Every structure is written in C-alpha cells, then in structure tokens.
Amino acid sequence: MDFETSISTAPSSRGKTTVPSEVGQSLPRSTIITILARLVNSQVLQAVRAILDFIYYTQYQSHTDITLAKMQDALDAFHSHKDAFIELRHGEELNIPKVHSMMHYLNSIRSLGSADGYNMESPEWLHIDYAKEAYRAGNGIDYVAQMTKWLQRREAIDCHTAYLDWVLAAPPTQSTSCNMQDSGLFTPSGIVPGHAYHLPKTSPFPNMSVSCLVSTFGALDFMLAFQAFLNKHIPKSRISASVYDRFKVFKFIVVLHPSVPHISDEKQF
C-alpha cells in the first residue's frame, strides 16, 4: 500500500477520511508521522521519520556544521531502518538512484553551497536525451546494448560535426589543395578544401527519373535539396533542377576527408 492510498484510507472517528493526493504531498512532517503511526510498524516509521528529517534539512537556505551533522544523523538512521521496506516487499532491493544520490548531498553542500538554488531541469533533460530517446530508437529487445550503440553513434556524429565546423571555419591552405591530387583515385569536390570522393565505375541504377527516386528510394525532398545545392555551390549556373532530369544512383560512395592533425596525419575514409 503506497502513501497516498494509506492516507486516503486511514480510519478516523467518523469512518474513512479521504485526502486528495495533492494535499498529501504538502502535508507537514508531524501530520505524515501521525498518519503513518497507525498504519506501519515501528521500523518503517523510524525510516520515514529519518528520511523526512533529511529532506527538510536539505531545504535549508543556509547551513552550519550542526545542521550538516544532523543531516548525516538522519541519513544514517534511514539506512539503519530501510531493511524494513525490503522485508515488506518480499526481498526486493532498494536499488533506487535517488536513494543513492542522498549520500552525495553533504559533500555537495560543503563544496557548492545550500541546495535550495538547484532544480532537476538539467538532469531531466539529460534523461530525455540519453535514456528516453535512446530507448525509443530501438525495438525494446536487449535495449541496454541498443541504447549504448545509439549513444556511441550520436557522440561520433557530434564529434565529427564539430570537426567539420572547425574545418569550414579555417582558411584554405595551398598544401591541403595540392595533397588532394596525390592519389589520383579521388575527385576533389570543390566544396571543402581537402575533401574528395570516389564512385564506382558503373551505376547499378542508371537513368533514374525524379518520380522513381521519390517512389522507390523515398527521396521526397530530393528536388529541393538538389536545387539548394546548385544555388549554394554553383550560384552562377544557368541550369536549374527539373522534374525531367535523369540521375545515376549508386549504392555507395567513398568520401575522403582531410587528415585530422590531432589524431593522425593520414587522410580518413
């Protein structure tokens, strides 16, 4: 039986007393202890009393060595009696991150100040980015491995994006432009210095229409993207994208990136 159910069904002199859940969340400590005293055993009551003391101490706007010592005493008392919850839950462990985080409160207050100026928005957003979205990206089977792989790929993309932004911001050098001609296997793209590509000799899907690109390959925004590419990189061209154009479609392309000085002198594929 949880707390909200307990206070809603707590007996009174007139039968049952119904207390809305939002009221139960704002009840003072003395009222909570009084209600629970009729519903739980002494071990549970002492654990609840200790955790409530700890919560109230953490809300102080300023602290002294005395209040911090009382916080530690309350935390120690909670850990001394928390086994009562495990016994009532048939051997379940209290492996709860918020319970673990309580041990770090005192050190955080001593080093950073009182906790009344903090909120949960930052860790909540991190939870959304790194847990919820990662889980939704998979199929729910072996989700820990899937989430880990998803996060690794996201981090790799972020790192490479930061590197490309840095390359684009750097002025082109003569050595970089000359080095692009050394292999002879790659064609300079002319978009980014040190950037080149290599395509297979033959296309497995030649002479593809725009409608086929949309229906077969799902390239719904191909025409818009193609025209944007022409406007950006060939602004003086008189050729514009047309639905009557034909395109070669390849299964893969090998892209040569310029060397990353802080990783290796070799060009990266």
Image (spheres, rainbow, N blue to C red):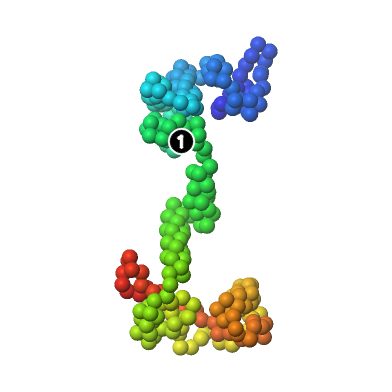
Q: Is residue 207 left or right of residue 100?
A: right
Q: Is residue 115 something one can see in this rendering?
A: yes
Q: Nearer the viewer, residue 45 or 190?
A: 190
Tell me the quadrant of the picture where the C terminus can be found: bottom left
Residue at 44% across, 38% down: 97
Q: Is residue 226 something one can see in this rendering?
A: no
Neighbour tally class for label 1: few under 14, some 14-19, many 20 plus, Cα within 10 Å? few
Amino acid at pointer 1? Lys
Q: Quadrant of residue 222?
A: bottom right
Seen in the picture, residue 112 relative to 174 is either above or below; the reply is: above
Residue 260, percent from left and from top: 36, 69
For label 1, the residue is 98
Residue 116, percent from left and from top: 50, 31
Q: Is residue 266 left or right of residue 140?
A: left
Residue at 62% across, 22% down: 9
Residue at the far top in the pictured view: 13
Residue at 45% across, 22% down: 50
